[in-house]
Image: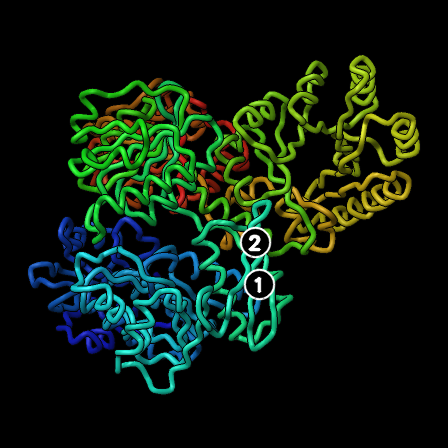
């Protein structure tokens, strides 16, 4: 976590009442805070806070960080001090972090919105960010950083450049909110709701509500729903809130500032009718589930308070996207798909996981493997009856329960639910699964990761991780620069640039992308078979695939009269069918496409028949990412618009025009037309350095160390004795080679990979299934993770070493590499 403001180490030592040990005075200016050594990005200005937890101790990573040039530390132990670095010694490192964040927060006077409640904090926070980002420069909690550790790291991001803060605060036991309140110090408070989470740690629900209300001790405005009586009752009793606190309320049951009346769900949307300041107002949202409706009303009320007009609110609310979840999707045995959510289990997260399960269309059968729900504070019969209703609503076909408690209540979940008393019992009698999507949902103590391991398809140790959150972030980044009516076509050709077609397409469909594009007909057929319903353009339709195009509602790109004739002849044989096509115009690529001067002949052909209908007309820009060719790009766009307008003027059907790719979308905003085509930018890769900083890395290719050997000076490594060792060295063999898509030209030191955040060079030739790296200066062991490319080691570094482009590398990744898809 970093900021543009800097502090001296002595200043921070005074803030947290620590003992200062300075051994490198020239390195005591602090800009970055680090609590996880694995997340080190840069050592300059970095302060590592060594936090001791139940299962970890940050102090053990100090020597390794020193080797990576981190020179400033907060520690709890004198024994952690080593020569050559600066230290602040404190009684409690976490408290010191919180004190530093509180100090940092005191430097800013702009509005801060603090959000607490049992559920919906992250969704409300993310939705408010998207609703307000066009008018405000917002700093917000990353993901769900709402804990005693996450909140100070979030607030540390505050900067003078921002003018609004959005922070969540979550607690699990008494006396936790006081520290978070001092750090966040919200001026506007939002209390989302109250539920059963963490009830076991409080004497009553009222006690829990009162603890959460402490977040708003200095707030000027508090927004909440009167439909939660515990909140209303607690507010009537507490005396620590300021007398001038303005309470803004909404309700569907009693009189409130925003009185919500009729709620109508239809065609995947919900229309809300309400009274605000004695006037009737309406709102349409793109969700029908109860949680999203509540969260939308909360956001609606805040926007009304901030003075937004009804039309603006409506426009923004219809653009809201679902908040991503921390779930992994993996390929399973026997043609199954596995959703891994094996580390937490409560009603709210179960509902989220079931929602993700229902997004998956690979298989008609859906199975849930569920553990006991622990420490909910609710009677088991009531709890599991509710879950049964939830499963029924989500049309779960098969339920397997694990745990002593569920042994007595599993029939409440599903009429044919099967119970196992323990994870070991389940694994000993492993049921047969085939052609189904399986959600594995369990509390941490049940060790359901063992079930996931048993059910996932076995592959070698190399994995391509696909961050669906990052993909959607990038989609929304580009959407943010588009006009209101401009559509998005997402390229999922070449198996989603190597990342997997269906899983990417499914996420894009869920987030309301308008169109998909694939390279070949069979790719489109597979997407249709997997449940993808979006319109799909096929860029290279084979002559013999017209039947499939029609059967599976695929729309071919047509670039020549030869292809047009083939389609027309086939349609004449079928008689009753028609097809939508996409015309490609060549405006300077000189690859595929009708020439501009062929437009009259093309129009004559199209008007001579009725069954070939034009859906869109497009062109391909030659160099939209290269400023030196901008004049040529403008000429291409000008030519294309003239051709497009010619066809529009002479064809009655509505026709979409599109020319821009990812780079063109931001560089030529005036040429966005009706649709843009997003390709590599979706996957977090841009030729523009400024834009690259705005994109999230989607793909991480990683493998592991198979073996480590000591090699003496003068010896060689690998085929052909190409890797010559000058000094005694430590060499690691890793489980990836050219059969996986690692170009042989990356051998012999040309390629560098990452181990424990340290770049290490290859040595010797790349082999078919493995390669070797020199880890002499890195602390590593067999089995350790090796990052080939990812957020900390961008793929551009490999493409630069190969004098190629990132496209070539990711499109060349072998299908034998296991793909793991996850949302956070």
Residue at the outermost bottom position: 243
Q: Is residue 168 visible?
A: yes
Look at 89% across and 34% down and name the residue there: 599
Secondary element type, mark 2: strand
Quadrant (top left/top right/bottom left/bottom right) for the N terminus: bottom left
Q: Quadrant of residue 73?
A: bottom left
Q: Is residue 751 above or below residue 208?
A: above
Secondary element type, mark 1: strand
Q: Is residue 498 visible?
A: no
Rendered image coloring scheme: rainbow
Disc 2 target residue: 264
As measured in the structure, the alpha-carbon distance from the residue carrying label 2 to the one carrying label 1 is 9 Å
Residue 163 on image: x %, y %: 48, 74
Q: Nearer the viewer, residue 405 or 134?
A: 405
Residue 792 image label: none
Assess whether mark 1 and mark 2 are in contact (beta carbons under 8 angstroms).
yes
Q: Quadrant of residue 456?
A: top left
Residue 670 on image: x %, y %: 73, 55
Residue 651 on image: x %, y %: 88, 38
Q: Classify 10 Å Cα crowding around label 2: few (below 14), some (14-19), many (20 and above).
A: few
Residue 90 on image: x %, y %: 13, 69
In the image, 712: left or right of 470?
left
Disc 1 target residue: 273
Disc on the earlier residue, 2 or 1: 2
């Amino acid at each position: 976590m970093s900021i543009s403001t800097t502090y001296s180490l002595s200043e921070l030592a005074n803030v947290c009442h620590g003992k200062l040990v300075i051994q490198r005075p020239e390195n005591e200016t602090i800009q970055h805070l680090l609590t996880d050594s694995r997340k080190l990005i840069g050592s300059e200005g970095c302060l590592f806070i060594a936090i001791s937890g139940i299962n970890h101790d940050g102090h053990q990573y100090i020597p390794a960080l020193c080797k990576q040039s981190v020179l400033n530390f907060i520690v709890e132990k004198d024994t952690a001090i080593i020569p050559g670095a600066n230290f602040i010694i404190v009684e409690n490192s976490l408290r010191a972090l919180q004190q530093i964040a509180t100090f940092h927060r005191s430097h800013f006077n702009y509005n801060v919105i603090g959000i607490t409640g049992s559920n919906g904090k992250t969704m409300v926070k993310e939705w408010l960010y998207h609703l307000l980002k066009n008018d405000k420069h917002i700093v917000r909690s990353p993901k769900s950083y709402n804990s005693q550790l996450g909140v100070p790291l979030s607030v540390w991001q505050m900067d003078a450049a921002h003018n609004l803060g959005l922070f969540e605060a979550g607690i699990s036991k008494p006396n936790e909110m006081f520290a978070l309140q001092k750090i966040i110090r919200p001026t506007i408070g939002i209390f989302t709701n109250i539920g059963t989470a963490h009830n076991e740690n409080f004497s009553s629900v009222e006690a829990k509500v009162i603890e959460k209300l402490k977040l708003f001790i200095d707030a000027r405005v508090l927004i909440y729903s009167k439909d939660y009586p515990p909140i209303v009752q607690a507010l009537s009793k507490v005396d620590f809130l300021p007398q001038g606190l303005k309470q803004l309320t909404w309700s569907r049951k009693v009189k409130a500032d925003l009185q919500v009346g009729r709620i109508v769900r239809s065609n995947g949307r919900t229309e809300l009718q309400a009274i605000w300041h004695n006037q009737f107002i309406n709102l349409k949202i793109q969700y029908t589930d109860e949680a999203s409706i509540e969260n939308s009303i909360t956001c609606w009320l805040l926007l009304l308070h901030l003075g937004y007009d009804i039309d603006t609110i409506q426009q923004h609310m219809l653009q809201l996207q679902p908040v991503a979840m921390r779930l992994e999707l993996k390929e399973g045995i026997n043609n199954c798909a596995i959703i891994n959510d094996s580390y937490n289990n409560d009603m709210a997260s179960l509902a989220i996981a079931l929602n993700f399960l229902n997004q998956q269309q690979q298989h008609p059968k859906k199975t849930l493997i569920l553990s006991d729900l622990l420490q909910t504070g609710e009677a088991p019969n009531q709890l599991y009856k509710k879950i049964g209703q939830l499963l029924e609503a989500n049309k779960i076909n098969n339920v397997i329960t694990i745990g002593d408690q569920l042994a007595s209540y599993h029939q409440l979940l599903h009429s044919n639910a099967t119970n196992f008393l323990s994870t070991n019992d389940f694994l000993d009698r492993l049921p047969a699964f085939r052609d189904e999507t399986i959600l594995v949902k369990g509390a941490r103590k049940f060790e359901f990761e063992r079930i996931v391991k048993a059910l996932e398809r076995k592959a070698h140790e190399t994995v391509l991780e696909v961050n669906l959150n990052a993909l959607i972030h990038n989609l929304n980044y580009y959407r943010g620069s588009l006009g209101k009516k401009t559509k998005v076509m997402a390229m999922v050709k070449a198996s989603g640039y190597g990342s997997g077609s269906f899983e990417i397409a499914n996420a894009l469909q869920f987030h309301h992308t308008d169109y998909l594009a694939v390279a070949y007909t069979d790719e489109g057929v597979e997407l249709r078979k997997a449940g993808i319903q979006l319109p799909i353009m096929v860029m290279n339709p084979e002559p013999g695939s017209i039947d499939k195009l029609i059967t599976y509602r695929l729309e071919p790109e047509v670039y020549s009269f030869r292809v047009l004739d083939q389609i027309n002849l086939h349609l004449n044989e079928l008689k009753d069918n028609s097809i939508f096509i996409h015309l490609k115009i060549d405006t300077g690529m000189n690859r595929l496409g009708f020439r501009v001067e062929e437009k009259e002949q093309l129009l004559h052909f199209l008007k001579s028949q009725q069954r070939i209908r034009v859906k869109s007309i497009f062109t391909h820009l030659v160099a939209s990412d290269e400023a030196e060719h901008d004049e040529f790009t403008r000429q291409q766009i000008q030519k294309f618009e003239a051709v497009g307008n010619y066809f529009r003027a002479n064809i009655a059907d509505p026709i979409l025009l599109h020319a821009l790719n990812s780079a063109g979308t931001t560089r030529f905003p005036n040429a966005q037309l009706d649709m843009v085509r997003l390709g590599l930018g979706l996957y977090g890769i841009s030729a523009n350095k400024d834009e690259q900083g705005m994109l999230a890395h989607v793909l991480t290719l990683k493998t592991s160390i198979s073996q480590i050997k000591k090699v003496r000076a003068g010896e060689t490594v690998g085929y052909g004795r190409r890797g010559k060792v000058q000094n005694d060295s430590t060499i690691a063999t890793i489980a990836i080679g050219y059969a996986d898509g690692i170009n042989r030209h990356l051998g012999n030191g040309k390629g560098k990979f990452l181990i424990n955040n340290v770049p290490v060079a290859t040595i010797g030739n790349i082999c078919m299934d493995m390669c070797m790296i020199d880890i002499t200066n890195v602390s590593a062991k067999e089995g350790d993770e090796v990052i080939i490319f990812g957020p900390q080691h961008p793929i551009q570094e490999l493409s630069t070493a190969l004098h190629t482009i990132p496209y070539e590398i990711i499109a060349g990744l072998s299908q034998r590499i296991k793909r793991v898809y996850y949302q956070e």
